[in-house]
Image: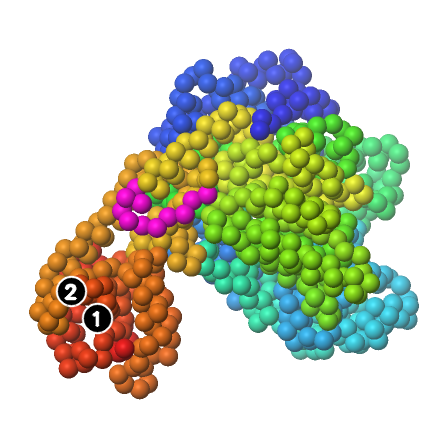
């Protein structure tokens, strides 16, 4: 989809703060070609595909895009920030420059929790994220804190979900209630809809008796535990009184969540003297029971979870969720990611955790203390100036900001022009930030220059990044350039950032104007809606679109938007739906009905052999559910969640078939949400948005919701979009904090990748998939592939090949995705690896088969057991007859056999009639090693056991030698089972 052109972007910039006049633009076009130079220098690391290779042509349209981008770069570089507006810290920007110099961004993904490492996916910075958690956790007395870096919304949801799930575990019969006062109301609405919690607002400033009575009513006379969500320092005018909350906690079962997103660095690095003087509470992160006393023996407030962030950062900046290690938060084990699905989202931006970690590490506790002391001195100067000019102002307890409460009309205009923020109470907030320490901002307002600030370089020199860290990062990225070309298990285009990353990185030390971000986001989303058949403004009032931090959150928001319109509906999804969707449903108290005797409001429908939802099974389940609804006297509504390209097999649910099957039985679909996270990155796949019950010109039902990923098909950094029919409310679970970096990258990618480019990429990938499929079949491997898919599913190879090419497993199968960065030559190499294993085993078998023939007195052939072979089916039947030679043997024989067969190296000795005589169970590992598991043989051969074991040792030795694999000892290798 082509995004909005630069002309519309520049039109959006015609404001007093913009440098977008034609005269200035003409001047800018004579400036240095920084962006073009960055693009040109990236050519040494390009990963060619049919689109990228065209970019060497100087007449290609990308060079016009680069020229436009260069104009934006110089325009924004020259812009001066207003004195008191919230903007990015200079030290943060300098950290971004350092990351650019080591070669970032390269395609990366911080999927899963920081301690959940998949060795076949090295494209992350979890070691830095772990250090960050330890550093921030230690400031609140818990260096083993659990959590991760994400958006402010996701961090808040993760923390509160952790408390929700812990309460489910320890109070299974007492549904919690979410209580708040000054907490951001947009966040509360999103959290309430995502987690299905009951919420109640109390006013901590009310008389105590009134407040207590309201809480008694909300908690059913103290029967229900409270999760109190408190805000400190995120807004200078809206802070919760922690002392009153602690007092309430002595009378009610209560656990505390603290949102210190913009104030954490400030309030957790204060000296004890400064803290007491400022009246700031000290927080300790601990697993407090709802009935425990709210303070430690030292008088510190116990928080059960905390959201942290950098020093006074913008609201779209990265946030850190901090919780103790709650037992209730486990998640589901997912083979595809080789880990537990614990995070609230799925894929995560890997740059933000690294950026925040380096920022915090270079400052350290002492550096933050020094910065804050300097800023407090400047705050005092600002307060004096305001007072001298007849204005009344005060300083915020939990932040560095100044609040002006009394001013004349002309003073108001002056303060707003200087970047002050007018809040709902009518007061003006002046942000006191690190920019004050560079001296640059004072040039626009001499009256506030009482202190003598440093220049920028002096400030940066005080807080250097350890050179060894930068060298480590540079080495890491250099290694990624090699590994990327054979990473074939994820639906991620890992090559585009090799060319466009250096362009994007040039903007990491700039403030992108908010008005540009907002207007461009609107244009991008409007264009996206139009591509799905919502072209006119009138219809777009009933459809909404929003940016997300990935498709998991997109699906989450889309599902809850559907339920907001049909609260009592049942949602139906196939067993092949992305694993995170079930997490979304289980997370929500109202959908899962964990606190009632009612059935959950979701149902998983079996899939066919291709991975598509079975229409007949869906119809059968709907009929049963309708009968139950009727018996309960409830109105039945149906939400359908369909896949336009499943994660593992690339299957598309047959929406037309499902619609016709249900229509034939008089069943109406209330709402359809389509997950096309991967496929929609190329085109709309014939899917159109429309009102519930509408059909397109071809009789295909229109959908009401759509999920899209940015980082999959085209490969920009982790983000996405969600589009929904929602005429009366916004999209559930979203907040209006646009990430400027995401909006800019999406604009750039939409300019660079024209529709014809996306079609060309898709055709190239499909051609390579056909090439791979044919090669695998020629080697005798069972394969599965959906029509026109670039995903080839086949039976598991040896584990170290799965590891080398980062293939994703699911049961007995793995998949290989021929993304644009996977060349035909890489596919040739992969097929050669498979062939080499076959050849090594053939040679080893040729030496051993005669020995077994002689020993057993019959013709023997050795067959390697592949997952889908007939021989493996024979083994599975045989396993039910096995008996141990000695008692006390391994109780998990069935699991051992499964792992051994999936290792693709187990060997069956069969006679001329195809009957099994014995089986050597062998397990392959990702570290190119093999493990010898129990020996299975006919009971009649027990008198030859010693000779058979001698031959087994020779076979294992030959296989290890020819496969260049190490033989690892096993605790069960000596065991023997007979049949």
Give the residue number, with chain letter if any, for mark 2. Answer: 860
Q: Residue at x 60, y 64 (%)?
A: 323
Give the residue number, with chain letter if any, for mark 1. Answer: 917
User: In the image, is 828 to the left or to the right of 892?
Assistant: left
Secondary element under disc 2, as helix, strand or loop, is loop
223 w.r.t. 813: above or below: below
496 w.r.t. 884: above or below: above
Q: Nearer the viewer, residue 700 or 189?
A: 700
Q: Residue at x 53, y 31 (%)?
A: 749
Residue 214 visible in the snapshot = yes
Marks 2 and 1, the one that precedes in the sequence? 2
In the rendering, at what x and y percent does residue 893 appear?
A: 35, 74
In the rendering, at what x and y percent does residue 196 appear?
A: 72, 60
User: In the image, is 647 to the left or to the right of 201?
Assistant: left
Residue 242 visible in the snapshot = no
Q: Is residue 782 magenta?
A: yes
Q: Is residue 466 magenta?
A: no
Secondary element under disc 1, as helix, strand or loop, is strand
Query: Would you identify the image quadrant in which residue 485 lies?
Result: top left
Q: Residue at x 84, y 38 (%)?
A: 389
- Numbered tag placed on residue 627 in the rendering: none
**Which class describes the residues within 10 Å of circle 1: few (<14), some (14-19), or many (20+)?**
many
| Residues drawn in magenta | 775-786
Distance from label 2 to label 1 (Cα)? 8 Å
Q: Nearer the viewer, residue 298 or 969?
A: 969
Residue reaching furthest to the bottom? 887
Pointers 2 and 1 in contact (C-beta within 8 Å): yes
Query: Would you identify the image quadrant in which residue 127 lies?
Result: bottom left
In the rendering, at what x and y percent does residue 110 appear?
A: 49, 51
| Quadrant occupied by the N terminus | top right
| Quadrant occupied by the C terminus | bottom left
Q: Residue at x 36, y 53 (%)?
A: 795
């Amino acid at each position: 989809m082509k995004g909005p052109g630069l002309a519309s972007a520049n039109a959006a910039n015609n404001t007093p703060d913009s440098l977008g006049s034609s005269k200035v633009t003409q001047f800018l076009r004579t400036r240095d070609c920084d962006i073009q130079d960055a693009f040109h220098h990236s050519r040494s690391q390009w990963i060619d595909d049919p689109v990228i290779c065209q970019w060497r042509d100087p007449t290609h349209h990308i060079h016009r895009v680069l020229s436009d981008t260069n104009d934006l770069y110089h325009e924004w570089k020259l812009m001066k920030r207003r004195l008191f507006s919230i903007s990015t810290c200079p030290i943060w920007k300098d950290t971004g420059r350092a990351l650019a110099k080591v070669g970032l961004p390269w395609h990366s993904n911080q999927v899963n929790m920081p301690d959940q490492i998949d060795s076949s996916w090295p494209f992350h910075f979890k070691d830095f994220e772990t250090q960050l958690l330890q550093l921030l956790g230690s400031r609140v007395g818990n260096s083993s804190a659990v959590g991760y870096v994400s958006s402010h919304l996701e961090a808040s949801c993760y923390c509160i979900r952790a408390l929700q799930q812990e309460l489910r575990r320890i109070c299974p019969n007492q549904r919690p209630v979410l209580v708040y006062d000054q907490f951001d109301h947009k966040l509360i609405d999103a959290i309430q809809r995502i987690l299905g919690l009951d919420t109640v607002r109390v006013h901590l400033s009310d008389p105590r008796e009134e407040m207590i009575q309201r809480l008694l009513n909300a908690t059913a006379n103290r029967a229900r535990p409270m999760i109190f969500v408190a805000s400190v320092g995120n807004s200078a005018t809206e802070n919760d009184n922690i002392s009153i909350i602690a007092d309430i906690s002595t009378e009610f079962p209560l656990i505390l969540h603290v949102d210190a997103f913009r104030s954490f660095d400030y309030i957790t690095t204060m000296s004890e003297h400064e803290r007491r003087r400022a009246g700031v509470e000290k927080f300790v992160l601990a697993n407090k029971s709802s009935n425990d006393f709210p303070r430690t023996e030292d008088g510190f407030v116990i928080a059960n979870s905390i959201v942290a962030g950098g020093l006074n950062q913008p609201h779209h900046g990265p946030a850190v969720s901090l919780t103790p290690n709650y037992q209730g938060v486990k998640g589901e084990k997912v083979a595809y990611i080789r880990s537990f699905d614990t995070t609230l989202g799925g894929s995560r931006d890997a740059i933000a955790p690294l950026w925040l970690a380096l920022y915090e590490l270079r400052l350290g506790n002492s550096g933050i203390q020094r910065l804050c002391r300097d800023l407090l001195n400047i705050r005092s100067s600002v307060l004096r100036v305001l007072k001298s000019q007849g204005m009344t102002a005060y300083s915020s307890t939990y932040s560095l900001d100044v609040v002006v409460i009394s001013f004349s009309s002309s003073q108001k205009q002056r303060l707003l022009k200087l970047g002050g923020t007018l809040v709902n109470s009518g007061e003006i907030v002046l942000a006191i930030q690190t920019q004050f320490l560079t001296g640059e901002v004072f040039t626009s307002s001499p009256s506030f220059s009482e202190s003598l600030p440093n220049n920028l370089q002096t400030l940066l020199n005080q807080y250097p990044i350890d050179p060894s860290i930068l060298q480590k990062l540079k080495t890491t990225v250099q290694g990624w350039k090699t590994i990327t070309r054979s990473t074939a298990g994820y639906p991620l285009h890992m090559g585009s950032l090799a060319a466009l990353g250096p362009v994007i990185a040039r903007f990491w030390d700039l403030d992108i104007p908010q008005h540009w971000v907002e207007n461009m986001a609107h244009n991008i989303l409007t264009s996206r809606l139009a591509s799905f058949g919502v072209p006119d403004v009138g219809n777009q009032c009933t459809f909404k679109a929003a940016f997300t931090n990935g498709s998991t959150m997109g699906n989450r928001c889309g599902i809850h938007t559907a339920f907001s319109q049909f609260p009592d509906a049942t949602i139906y999804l196939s067993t092949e739906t992305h694993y995170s969707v079930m997490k979304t449903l289980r997370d929500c108290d109202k959908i899962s009905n964990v606190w009632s005797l009612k059935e959950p409001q979701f149902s998983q429908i079996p899939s066919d052999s291709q991975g598509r939802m079975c229409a007949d099974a869906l119809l059968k389940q709907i009929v049963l559910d309708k009968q139950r609804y009727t018996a309960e006297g409830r109105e039945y509504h149906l939400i359908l969640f369909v896949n336009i390209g499943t994660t593992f097999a690339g299957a598309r649910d047959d929406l037309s078939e499902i619609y016709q099957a249900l229509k034939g039985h008089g069943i109406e679909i209330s709402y359809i949400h389509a997950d096309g996270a991967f496929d929609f990155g190329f085109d709309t796949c014939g899917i159109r948005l429309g009102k519930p019950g509408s059909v397109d010109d071809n009789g295909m039902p229109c959908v009401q919701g759509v999920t899209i990923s940015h980082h999959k098909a085209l490969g920009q950094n982790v983000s996405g979009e969600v589009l929904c029919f929602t005429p009366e409310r916004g999209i559930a679970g979203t907040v209006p904090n646009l990430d400027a970096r995401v909006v800019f990258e999406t604009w750039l990618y939409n300019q660079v990748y024209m529709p014809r480019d996306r079609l060309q990429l898709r055709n190239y990938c499909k051609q390579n998939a056909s090439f791979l499929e044919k090669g695998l079949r020629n080697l005798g491997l069972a394969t599965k592939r959906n029509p026109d898919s670039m995903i080839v599913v086949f039976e598991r190879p040896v584990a170290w090949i799965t590891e080398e090419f980062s293939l994703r497993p699911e049961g007995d199968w793995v998949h290989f995705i021929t993304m644009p960065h996977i060349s035909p030559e890489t596919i040739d190499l992969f097929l050669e690896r498979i062939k080499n294993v076959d050849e090594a085993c053939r040679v080893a078998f040729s030496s051993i088969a005669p020995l077994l023939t002689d020993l057993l007195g019959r013709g023997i052939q050795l067959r390697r057991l592949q997952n889908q072979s007939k021989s493996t089916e024979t083994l599975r039947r045989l396993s039910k007859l096995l008996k141990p030679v000695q008692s006390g043997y391994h109780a998990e024989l069935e699991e051992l056999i499964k792992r051994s067969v999936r290792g693709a190296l187990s060997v069956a000795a069969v006679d001329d009639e195809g009957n099994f005589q014995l089986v050597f169970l062998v397990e392959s590992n990702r570290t190119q090693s093999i493990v010898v598991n129990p020996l299975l043989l006919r009971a009649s051969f027990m008198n030859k056991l010693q000779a058979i074991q001698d031959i087994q040792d020779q076979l294992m030795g030959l296989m290890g030698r020819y496969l260049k694999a190490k033989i690892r000892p096993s605790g069960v290798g000596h065991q023997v089972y007979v049949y």
